[in-house]
Amino acid sequence: MSLTHSFLLAARQQEIAELQSLNGTCELVRRTGELIHALQAERGSANACLTSPEPSFRERWQDKCTMTNSAISDFNALLTGNLSITGTSRLYARIALAVNTLTVLSSHRGQVAELEASAAESTSQYSKIIDALIALIFEAIDATAEPEVSRLLLALFNLIEAKAYAGLERANGVRLLGAVPSHKIDQQTIVDLIDCQEQSLARFETFCGEDIRAQWSALQSTLPLHELERLRRQLLSPNSTLSKGFINTWFDTCSARIDGLHLVEQHMADLIQKACRKRIAETNALLDEQRESLKVNTIPSDDWMAQATTAAASEAVDHEHRLASRLNRTLMDLLQQQSADLQTMSTELSSVRAALEDRKLIERAKGLLMVQQGISEEAAYGLLRQKAMSQHLKITEVANSLLAIADFFPTRPN
């Protein structure tokens, strides 16, 4: 086999190896998403436990802790197993950070159990862990180079993010219900979280594809959206005088919607891994076809071998020339096909990459506002969005303009 043949086949073999690593990355995203979901439920029930003396809330929180422990066990088992992932040093650093944040969970649970933490402090502690896990998922997507899988992963990320904001709304709503009287800043936090959910779900719908979008529309009719809107209006009423007994209704309604979103998340994770396995099978089939094609065009037939032993030398040379010409045509066809495949992948991937870069830009601008203004992530996003709407610009344009003058911002005192 010539050097050209060897590298042509090696290219397909490397593509298969990369797809298998991508399948491992998708499993990492799945396990991380399951852990985030468990932590969100634990965070909300911890706030209920800290806000209300009812024994049922403590029992519910303990049940959620057990579910989180199971999710952590699955997450760690994946990391300590024979895991092959597509990633960069940044992804491995994100994994290390996420694992490290999980180590503080036990001590915080002790504070919750002894009622030594406030609901606000508890929300913050859980959110640090969840944010580290969400950042891990985003980094995994950023390292993915398969267009279809990248698109679905980006849709999944925005769904997980929307669910994270919904979980924060649930937790902050519980905290708000335990505060007497309600504070306007806390109510504005709920408003900002609702807006963030809507934006994330809009991005999810952009990238999920028509089939999933249709299923998503059908699912929404089964979720308690009208009840949730009614509860939101009551919670955000300027003269709200809701009792702590309202916590149960709020928590259960929010949870029902979040669980519905989680069903979509699980379905998406299944589809993504099926897409990976399909691409692996297709690429294996292409590799077999290339091997067979090269084999057919490099091994002389029995008829030619018989002719070669009796024909004149000039005829043999002429036949070898024709054989080499046919082999070159086969190689050119294979090379052109692989080149076309790479070009198609590059074109399809560009739109996903653009969305990821926009996301990074917005995150950096939010971070700058959070540091300079001393505000929450949700409030920072709200400022960017308000500015974009008032000036008829895209949020990315506002973010880019803000970052362009970042050096002129004074250092905010600690």
Image: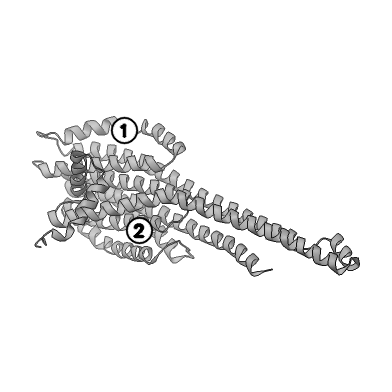
Secondary structure beneath label 2: helix
What amino acid is labelled 2 in the image? Leu
Between disc 1 and disc 2, the foreground one is: 2
The x and y percentages for residue 365 are 22, 53
What amino acid is labelled 1 in the image? Pro
Q: In this view, does 350 lie above or below 103?
A: above
The x and y percentages for residue 80 are 43, 66
- Taking the image as shown, residue 248 lies to the left or right of residue 10, namely left
In the image shown, does 226 or 216 lie closer to the viewer? 216
Q: Residue at x 33, y 53 (%)?
A: 357
Q: Is residue 310 above or below residue 122?
A: below
Judge whether residue 218 can be spotted in this image.
yes
Q: Are marks 1 and 2 in contact (CB under 8 Å)?
A: no
Q: Earlier in the sequence, mark 1 or mark 2?
A: 2
Q: Could you tell me which quadrant the C terminus lies in?
A: bottom left
Label 2: how many residues lie within 10 Å, few (<14), some (14-19) or many (20+)? many
Q: Which residue is drawn at 56% across and 50% down?
A: 278
Label 1: how many residues lie within 10 Å, few (<14), some (14-19) or many (20+)? some
- Taking the image as shown, residue 37 lies to the left or right of residue 291, namely left
The x and y percentages for residue 369 are 17, 53
- Taking the image as shown, residue 308 lies to the left or right of residue 60, namely right
Marks 1 and 2, Cα distance to the nearest angstrom? Answer: 31 Å
Quarter occupied by residue 174: top left
Q: Residue 136 carries which label?
A: 2
Residue picked out by circle 1: 224
In the image shown, does 57 or 178 lie closer to the viewer? 178
